[in-house]
Amino acid sequence: MDKHLHIISLDVPFPANYGGVYDLFYKLPALHNQGVKIHLHCFNNGRSEQPELNKYCEEVYYYERNIGHKGISTKLPYIVCSRKSEALENNLLKDEYPVLMEGIHCSAVAFDKRFHDRKKFVRLHNVEYQYYKHLYHYSSSLLKKMYYRWESHLLKKYEEQLVNKVVAFWPVTEKDAKIYRQKFHCTNIQYLPLFLPQWTIKCKPGMGSFCLYHGKLSVDENEYAATWLIENIFKKLEIPLVIAGMNPSSALQKLAKQNQHTCIVANPSEKEMEDLIEKAQVHVLPSFNNTGIKIKLLNALYNGRHCLVNDPAIEGTGLEELCHVINTENAFRERVVQLYHQPFLDEEVETRRIVLNKLYNNRTNAKQMIEWIWGS
């Protein structure tokens, strides 16, 4: 019997050119290769229709988000309310196929009585109420802080109610699973590693020539981390720091110019980013948000040398043994200096190969999904 699956995606999942889309996209060919017939529903978040998706899906639907005041509710989080769609609901009601909701963002149908008996699953990309709580703390904009705080409040109540509305949650880290069990008494939650490109271990032994922080710099958390690195770590060191990513703010660029050992590479091409990751000696990737997993860290582990992180960046990921984990500013600076002069070894490359190949196997993880959904 054919296995059909509806997938509701929070964004159009192609091209896979930023971290949040990797899992959304690379899950599709993995399931398709296992014979799953995918009916994909995408919310347009500023992206156009993508014919590439037709290679892996039986059909692809596109829906406009209810942005601005249209997506505001006193009861529903904005990320959910802005993705409520009568057209989506009608398309889902045409059959009885299982439904995979990509993120809390796409889970509104779980509360619709018409879907009470449907098999429904949520891919948990973050513990969203905690994610927005962290954004509140690290944003410099008063208006954004107000939004993030209110969204976190709504999300906490919403996520707690959602626990009993679906068959299972599949978080991207064991840490997020633990939070759901402790905070929401959730028992229907099982860790499922990220789906990634067909990366192989390409990190090169030896020495690089600079330290690197990279990420989508328009994200408040990433700007905060880059600012923290400049002001608290590298301002006191004579070691070059490169900060690379999409849409850095003028404030971040001004700050970088004030530090003679720091430069910003704004909106690098894919090839430019690959070159930076390959040539860096130390990947400095602290995080101030302890939910989900950071694609930039995985990219560095597959393709770069030393990775220096703090606990929030690594806890519960299964990647702890592959990184240098430091949590105080003084110790972070000292480890930067040490690693900048310390060759990256063949043995470290091999350790990464063993750990990463075991965790991030798209074929194995697609089969696990199929077993959870259909029991075979």
Image (spheres, rainbow, N blue to C red):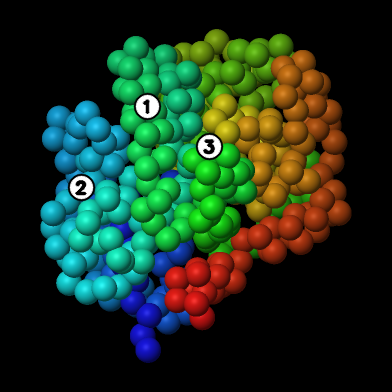
Q: CA distance from mark 1 to mark 2?
A: 19 Å
Q: Residue at x 68, y 30 (%)?
A: 310
User: 97 left or right of 310?
Assistant: left
Res 78 quadrant in image: top left
In the picture of the structure, the residue carrying the numbered disc 1 is 153
Q: Which of the two discs, 2 and 3, sits closer to the camera? A: 3
Three-letter code for the amino acid on which mark 3 is drawn? Lys
Q: Residue at x 17, y 41 (%)?
A: 66
Q: Residue at x 19, y 36 (%)?
A: 71
Q: Residues within 10 Å of mark 2 (few under 14, many from 20)?
A: many
Res 7 quadrant in image: bottom left
Q: Residues within 10 Å of mark 3 (few under 14, many from 20)?
A: few
Three-letter code for the amino acid on which mark 2 is drawn? Lys
Q: CA distance from mark 1 to mark 3?
A: 14 Å
Q: Say which quadrant the N terminus sits in.
A: bottom left
Q: Nearer the viewer, residue 100 or 330?
A: 100
